[in-house]
Amino acid sequence: RAFLYRLWKGNVSSKMLNPRLQKAMKDYLNTNKHGVRFPGKREARLSRQELLCELRRRVRVQTLDGKEAPFSALGWDKHVPAVPLSRLYPRGLRSCAVVMSAGAILNSSLGKEIDSHDAVLRFNSAPTRGYEKDVGNKTTMRIINSQILTNPNHHFIDSSLYKDVVLVAWDPAPYSANLNLWYKKPDYNLFTPYIQHRQRNPNQPFYILHPKFIWQLWDIIQENTKEKIQPNPPSSGFIGILIMMSMCREVHVYEYIPSIRQTELCHYHELYYDAACTLGAYHPLLYEKLLVQRMNTGVQEDLHRKGKVTLPGLWAVSC
Ligand code: C5P
């Protein structure tokens, strides 16, 4: 519990994690699988307002538009939706909810509050059926990693989880964001199922995030963290928070920073325990959370009891 209290105050470091997680972090730093090169400075001195302005200045949601090689030669400009994600809601969204899949959301009774927002973002295969009381039942958008598209266990083609929602997929690319290299060797080949799904469901908005966007978020996390963070992409949760901050006037994030219900139960919908789900091993999750904690404009009580962080939309920040 001591760790949780310090996390709420933004006062933790990776040295306080259990030895197994520390070892995993170190191994990822040594492997540097994605070829990350960070020549910038690492510090954590920006205030909340300065951080928000920095995000407003730099964060631009970018999806594949099919106009760059190798996608241009493959006719992708005809395959991707005509309206880009950044222009899907031209008048913007007012209030948005980002619902993390953490086990700690069980017994929260947050369902009604979550559904009261104009748009609700969920992740990967997180269901609502059977969990309505705690997580609500509205889903506007789903962020899915490339394993969802490629692992048959997820039934991407026929599961109702992926119907009638805006879909945003991503896959870890090289830090160089070289699209040719990525296309030849994605982490999981999401390109084939993406095209197939687009052809079968041409009216469903479905995007693939541009690697530049993902690594730009990584740069921002590292620049604002004193410690060396894992050289791997941010978690879907962090990516989703920034997408919603770009599209909504106000963003309410549930069970990202854990509430008093904190548990090692990885997901609310799965009987599997691992502290890495909440604190990170592959993803620089602990550092993402510290950054989000620094931007929280909500009251402490909401953080402790609901696991809720409130963030202004980037276009509602005055800089
Ligand atoms: O595991 P998955 O990526 O599907 O979960 C969605 C997001 O929720 C994660 O990317 C992470 O940001 C967040 N999460 C968390 N704590 C957990 C499980 C998930 O913060 N225990």
Image (tube, rainbow, N blue to C red):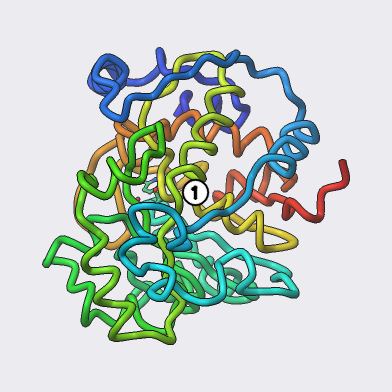
Task: Assign the C terminus to one quadrant of the image.
Answer: top right
Q: Name the spot of residue 25 as percent of width and height, x first.
A: 31, 21
Q: Name the spot of residue 187 as percent of width and height, x first.
A: 22, 45
Task: Assign the N terminus to one quadrant of the image.
Answer: top left
State how many labels appear: 1
Give the residue drawn at x 48%, y 17%: 13
**Residue 259 seen in this snapshot:** no
Q: Return the residue found at the far left.
A: 152
The answer to whether residue 21 is above or below residue 107 is: above
Does 38 sit left or right of 225 as displayed? left
Does 22 sit left or right of 167 as displayed? left
**Quadrant location of residue 250?**
bottom right
Give the residue drawn at x 36%, y 20%: 17
Q: Name the spot of residue 90 as percent of width and height, x first.
A: 71, 74
Give the residue drawn at x 49%, y 31%: 4
**Quadrant location of residue 174?**
top left
Closer to the camera, 210 or 24? 210
User: Are there few (<14), some (14-19), or many (20+) residues within 10 Å of tag 1?
Assistant: many
**Element carrying mark 1:** helix
Give the residue drawn at x 48%, y 62%: 65
Give the residue at mark 1: 239
Q: Name the spot of residue 240 as percent of width and height, x first.
A: 51, 54
Ligand 1 within 8 Å of disc 1? The answer is: yes
Closer to the camera, 309 or 195? 195
Q: Amino acid at mark 1?
A: Ile
**Residue 62 seen in this snapshot:** yes
